[in-house]
Image (cartoon, helix red, strand yellow):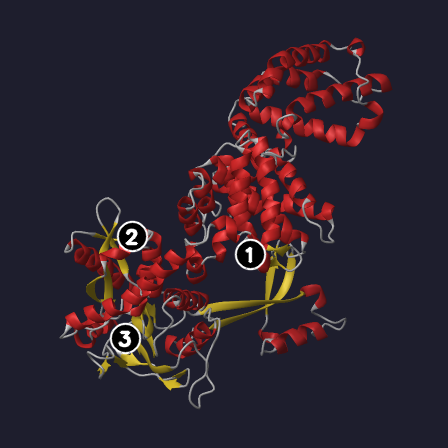
């Protein structure tokens, strides 16, 4: 008897949203797999398929039924199971009734903790065919669809109207209703090349039937690879290389069931426009792949994909060329018009654009960022004039026609227009780099002015939005504050900038004039930034306890923080590391209970030392200061901790032979003060008592 079969589910619809097709496909697969696993239905493999008109899932070797299992329910303890006359108690009788049985059918379970009534029942597993319909309905209902729609007279909802549903288990149709449709074995091929219904006889025949008879490549990954290779082959035919970005490649894959490449041309005069303008026009508006030469320069060609094999491919080529020409002509017009007005002359117009209701206009933000840039440049001994100039012009390209049409070109166009206005090259570059890093892992600004502007802009946004009470919660972060905070940290750390986050926040907070709690804002922003720093450090391979050891001493400079963190990570690898961490835990606990800093601090007297071991520890500590102080001044924390590690034997000997909590109060306090000073030597770097063994 067959114990497993392949399961095929396909949902056919109107054209699905291309930018969310892959997300929907993956979610459907994950939902079904999770439900099958929860139902204890075993299988060997699973695969999702997706085209513009279908979502499908194939589950290989899916068990025909759940396994039979024994269910055990524990009831009341034996001492509570009988009344005084020996008859079953109400609790016992109620338990039996709840299990659908009688008291005499209950058994006893004896453990080392006592004896209980127990009911054991053999439960036969349900068949897969009975379970699948509800599993599919629940999986579809749980899809991440932002806005569902209804159609016709149906009360069901989905992202697009559905037209057919295939549900095969092996070679047998599981009859049920999905989104108002009765399931069957009939799918549909390509809308134009194979509009007739196609019958799937066996689940495993799905791909082959669609490909051979339906002119449909159902496998998204296969289609994506085919489009990529076809685009490069087409570009090679015009002596070029296709410029392929993965987001567009996925979108084109989601738009085509039977992709056919088409190479088109445009007037070479448009190559005088910035390359980013041409690329954005081709990619965003037309879904074309631009073509570049071997040096990275654009060629006057593009690659598009048609969803049909046309008998007149030249007509498709000409049609796309007719469409792209007015698009590029518009871009050319924007470029020429924008250059008639210098960026400097656009600054005042920023007063007409609201940044945020409580924080004023973009012009107000510009003036704040200017002040921040001046402060940061001063701290870094950078060119203050360039920093202020870049901050003044930073947002002016928002007022240009080009950025008004292509919002993703902000900063990029500022760079081009600034160069056209004969602004200093570093200022022009900073206008683009203010938005760096654009995403996780992408480059930080390369110029010091760009770094200053990027930090100033992000700090202003961060503190401003927090001051307005719009703190990110959960997944909601409309102002991308998490990205801003991580960007600040990455710029500072990766470019080795000696900047104190507290100072930046203090200056930024002082620049706002609306009514808000400045102290709470400072704290909230600081906590938020260092939460991002923790994530950054964990991603870099540091452990949570290493991070805690450093954050405990509250260093304000991210670069300095990372140096301390590196030192702590290296310290714990030393032979002395674990012993000294344990000793610091012990010191911490002793001082927490018995040391009153305000009463006892600075009252240590070396003349009160009695035992040889405490005298030796004091001598070793004093000698270490001569070596450690210059290391701390150089911020060579690893060398400083290595020097402190040499105290291990003296610390161990002290705890082995010296009674800290002596009866003599003066002696006790002197020893507590000694431990306080010892702990302080480590706390100049990190609290190593936080390290876990």
Which residue carries the number 3 mark?
170
Q: Quadrant of residue 19?
A: bottom left
Helix, strand or loop at disc 1? helix
Sequence-wise first label, 2 or 1:
2
**Front-lying residue, 318 or 534:** 318
Compare residues 671 and 70 and report the one nearer the observer. 671
C-beta proximity under 8 Å, tags 1 and 3: no
Residue that badge 2 annotates: 272
Instruction: Identify which residue is drawn at 65% across, 34% down.
Output: 554
Q: CA distance from mark 2 to mark 3?
A: 60 Å
Above-or-below relation of 241 to 215 = above
Picture coordinates of residue 181, whole percent (x, y): 38, 85
Picture quadrant where residue 104 is located: bottom right
Percent from the top left, x then y, of residue 206?
A: 24, 73
Q: Does dot 2 land on a helix, a strand or a loop?
A: helix
The image quadrant of residue 379 is top right
Quadrant where the C terminus is found in the figure: top right
Depth check, front residue: 354 or 113: 354
Mark seen at residue 477: none
Left or right of 193 in this view: 567: right
Q: Which residue is mark 1?
A: 349
Res. 633 in view = yes
How many angstroms separate mark 1 from mark 3 (CA)? Answer: 68 Å
* Numbered disc 3: secondary structure: loop
């Amino acid at each position: 008897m067959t114990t497993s079969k392949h399961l095929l589910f396909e949902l056919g619809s109107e054209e699905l949203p291309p930018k969310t097709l892959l997300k929907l496909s993956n979610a459907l697969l994950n939902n079904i797999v999770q439900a099958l696993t929860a139902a204890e239905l075993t299988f060997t493999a699973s695969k999702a398929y997706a085209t513009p008109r279908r979502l499908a899932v194939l589950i290989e070797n899916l068990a025909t039924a759940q396994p039979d299992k024994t269910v055990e329910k524990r009831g009341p303890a034996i001492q509570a199971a009988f009344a005084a006359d020996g008859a079953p108690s109400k609790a016992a009788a109620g338990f039996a009734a709840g299990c659908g049985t009688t008291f005499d059918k209950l058994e006893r379970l004896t453990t080392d903790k006592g004896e209980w009534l127990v009911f054991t029942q053999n439960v036969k597993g349900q068949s897969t065919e009975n379970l699948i319909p509800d599993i599919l309905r629940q999986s579809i209902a749980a899809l991440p669809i932002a806005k569902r729609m209804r159609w016709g007279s149906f009360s069901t909802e989905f992202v697009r109207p559905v037209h057919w549903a295939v549900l095969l288990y092996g070679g047998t149709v599981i009859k049920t209703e999905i989104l108002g449709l009765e399931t069957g074995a009939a799918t549909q091929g390509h809308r134009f090349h194979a509009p007739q219904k196609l019958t799937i006889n066996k689940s495993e025949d799905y791909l082959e039937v669609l490909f051979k008879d339906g002119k449909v490549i159902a496998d998204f990954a296969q289609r994506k690879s085919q489009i990529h290779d076809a685009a490069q082959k087409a570009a090679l035919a015009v002596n070029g290389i296709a410029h392929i970005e993965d987001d567009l490649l996925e979108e084109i894959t989601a738009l085509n069931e039977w992709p056919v490449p088409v190479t088109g041309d445009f007037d070479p005069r448009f190559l005088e426009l910035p390359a980013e303008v041409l690329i954005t026009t081709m990619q965003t508006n037309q879904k074309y792949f631009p073509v570049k030469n071997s040096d990275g320069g654009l060629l006057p060609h593009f690659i598009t994909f048609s969803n049909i094999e046309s008998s007149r491919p030249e007509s498709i080529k000409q049609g796309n060329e007719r469409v792209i020409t007015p698009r590029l002509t518009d871009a050319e017009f924007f470029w020429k018009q924008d250059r008639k007005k210098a960026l400097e002359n656009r600054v005042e117009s920023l007063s007409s654009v609201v940044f945020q209701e409580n924080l004023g206009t973009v012009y107000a933000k510009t003036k704040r960022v200017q002040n921040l840039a001046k402060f940061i440049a001063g701290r870094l001994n950078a060119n203050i004039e360039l920093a202020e100039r870049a901050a003044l012009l930073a947002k002016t390209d928002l007022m240009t026609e080009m950025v008004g049409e292509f919002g993703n070109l902000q900063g990029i166009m500022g760079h081009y227009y600034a160069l056209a206005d004969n602004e200093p090259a570093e200022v022009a570059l900073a206008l683009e780099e203010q938005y760096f890093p654009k995403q996780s892992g992408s480059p930080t600004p390369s110029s010091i002015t760009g770094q200053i502007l990027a930090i100033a802009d992000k700090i202003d946004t961060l503190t401003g939005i927090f001051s307005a009470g719009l703190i990110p919660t959960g997944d909601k972060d409309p102002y991308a504050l998490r990205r801003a905070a991580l960007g600040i940290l990455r710029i500072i750390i990766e470019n080795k900038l000696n900047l104190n986050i507290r100072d930046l926040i203090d200056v930024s907070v002082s620049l706002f004039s609306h009514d808000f709690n400045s102290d709470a804002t400072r704290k909230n922003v600081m906590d938020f930034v260092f939460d991002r720093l923790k994530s950054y450090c964990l991603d870099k391979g540091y452990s949570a306890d290493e991070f805690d050891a450093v954050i405990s001493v509250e260093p304000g400079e991210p670069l300095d923080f990372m140096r301390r963190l590196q030192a702590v990570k290296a310290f714990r690898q030393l032979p002395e590391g674990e012993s000294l961490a344990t000793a610091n835990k012990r010191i911490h606990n002793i001082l927490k209970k018995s040391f009153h800093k305000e009463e006892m601090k600075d009252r240590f007297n070396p003349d009160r030392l009695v035992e040889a071991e405490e005298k030796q520890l004091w001598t070793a500590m004093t000698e270490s200061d001569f070596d450690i102080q210059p290391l701390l001044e150089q911020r060579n924390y690893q060398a400083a901790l290595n020097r402190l590690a040499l105290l291990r034997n003296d610390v161990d000997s002290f705890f082995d032979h010296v009674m800290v909590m002596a009866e003599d109060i003066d002696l006790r306090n002197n020893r507590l003060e000694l431990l306080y000073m010892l702990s302080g030597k480590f706390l100049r770097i990190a609290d190593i008592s936080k390290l876990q063994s």
